[in-house]
Amino acid sequence: MKSIMRRVDRFCLTHPSFGIRNLMIYIITGNVLVWIFSMMDRSGKLLELVRFSAEAIFTRGEVWRLVTFIFVPTTSTSSFRAIIMFAFVMYCYYQFGKLLEQYWGAGKFTIFYLSGVLFNVLFGTVIWLITGINMSIDTFYLNFTLYFAFATLFPDTMVLFFGIIPLKAKWIAFAEAAYFAYIMISKPFPINLLPLIAVLNYLIFCGGWLFDMVRPSRIQQKQTTINFKKAAKKYNREQAAKPYNRKCEVCGRTDRDNPNLEFRFCSKCGGYHCFCADHINSHVHFKE
């Protein structure tokens, strides 16, 4: 996972214009529009036309479903309670998506979301090819993992649970993880695997941070055994033979190519590792 994230970070650095800025605004707008039009269409044909269906895609050529299923709303009823819940859910998607985009950048966040979409498409297609079950997939669980990612990066941030109860982000994430586990146990196959597919995408992007969060004692133990003076001398000796003094472990930029860029060393990594200002707080920690 760490090597994958390095490649993603490097790709985003070398392609700064890649990514859809304010991606969640487009996704939420699509959800709202589909929900409004589905309320006008009492027959339910609209929702059936935009849902994911591997059978419809491969046998009838309805390839638009590969994109439109992203905009299938979480509710199809027009009761007052459903409207309030729908609005609250959309607001949460926007807030957590916006925070992740600000932290990761538009490129990395776009890759995160689109890879989750791709995992859903591949899962639905494989299930149809193997079992003949034509699953109707949406991005409900994928959108849930936006909060998982937020809670992993900012575990001690206070969040209002249901907009009322102040709790640390990590405790709400544990509650949502329990909900995912309940779905996997209670729902029939293959629907019960949808949360697992969403979590797989989350682990690829946040597994390193999650590991650091759930095993802090091991990290602290390694930190206390590191001789930074000795590691610094070794690092400086190695750098003496190179045409630069500092090089980011994530993006590969050096102080020679970017003389105005600030470089720092991470105290949470095992060993003596240098990062640029853009990645000092957004890298997977090294273990030695």
Image (cartoon, helix red, strand yellow):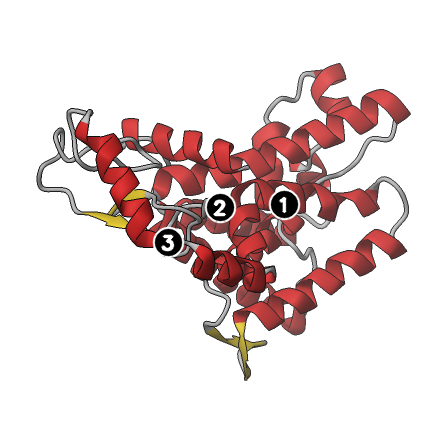
Q: Is residue 153 above or below residue 201?
A: below
- Is residue 215 found left or right of 274 in the rendered image? right
Where the N terminus falls, by quadrant?
top right
**Mark 2 highlights which residue?**
27
Task: Tell me the CA gap for discs 1 and 3.
Answer: 47 Å
Q: Would residue 190 appear left or right of 92 to someone viewing this image?
A: right
Q: Nearer the viewer, residue 81 or 104?
A: 104
Name the disc covering residue 139, or none.
1
Q: What is the three-letter code of the residue carrying label 3?
A: Asn
Location of residue 55 with respect to 217 vertically, above or below = above
Residue 53 seen in this snapshot: no
> Mark 2–mark 1 contact, CB under 8 Å?
yes
Category of crowding for the residue at label 1, using alpha-carbon neighbours closer than 10 angstroms: few (below 14), some (14–19), many (at least 20): many
N-terminal of the pair, mark 1 or mark 3, is 1
Q: Amino acid at mark 2?
A: Ile
Q: Are marks 1 and 3 in contact (CB under 8 Å)?
A: no
Q: Nearer the viewer, residue 49 or 13?
A: 13
How packed is label 2: few (under 14 Cα within 10 Å), some, or many (20 or more)? Answer: some
